[in-house]
Amino acid sequence: MKPFLETKVEDLDFGLAIPARGLYLFAQQALPLLQTSISASPVNPPTLLITGATASLRGSAKFGTFAAGMFAQRALGQSLAREFGPKGVHVALAVIDSGIDGPRMRAMLGEDAKKAVEEDKVMSPDAIAESHWHLHAQHRSSWTQELDLRPWQEKF
């Protein structure tokens, strides 16, 4: 997180490397395998699920290089959905618009962590997994291409 004028092109390269380049490299390897399993899994066709973040939808101050990578990941996901959906592979993006309960989040929240978890102000990993499973289990006549996940009290 840096003010834009303090960033270097290397910061942009790093911001693009994991979400955009990572998805590109993963999809290059995974999609051929998913395509070979289409006929063997007619009930739940093969699914490529991409996990994004709030920055997939909007950039925030001082998050320009991160947002660039997340926007690029989303765009690549949309392109893959349009190319491989008609071939029988469900490609979907789940945007996570919140912190996720776990050791790192609890350390960041400190004393407020217990209350945040009890009041469902941070996302449950199990609930996220359930939403991802729902994407995979969808009938191909009504595939979701993009899903926003957020706690019930999240402002958006």
Image: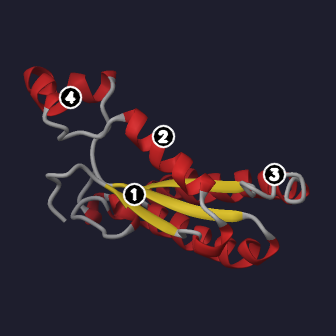
Q: Position of residue 68 (x, y in %)?
A: 43, 67
Q: Secondary structure at mark 1?
A: helix
- The residues tagged by marks 4 and 2 sit, at their Cα atoms, a distance apart of 22 Å
Helix, strand or loop at mark 4 = helix
* Residue 86 place in picture, x, y as percent: 76, 78
Dot 2 crowding, Cα within 10 Å, few <14, some 14–19, many 20+:
few
Q: Tell me how far mark 4 sits from mark 3, CA to CA.
A: 35 Å
The residue shown at (61%, 53%) is 136
Q: Are marks 3 and 1 in contact (CB under 8 Å)?
A: no
* Dot 1 and dot 2 residues touching (CB under 8 Å): no
For label 3, the residue is: 29
Q: Earlier in the sequence, mark 4 or mark 3?
A: 3
The answer to whether 145 is drawn above or below residue 117 in the figure is below
Residue in the foreground of this view, choosing between 26 and 129 = 129
The amino acid type of the residue labelled 3 equals: Gln
Tell me the distance, in whole angstroms, between the alpha carbons under discs 3 and 1. Answer: 24 Å
Mark 3 packing: few (<14 Cα in 10 Å), some, or many (20+)?
A: few
> Which disc is residue 132 wearing?
none
The residue where tag 4 is placed is: 108
Q: For residue 129, which numbered disc appears in the image? A: 2
Of the residues tagged 3 and 1, which is closer to the observer?
3
Identify the amino acid type marked 2. Ala
Residue 66: which numbered mark, if any?
A: 1
The CA distance from mark 3 to mark 2 is 23 Å
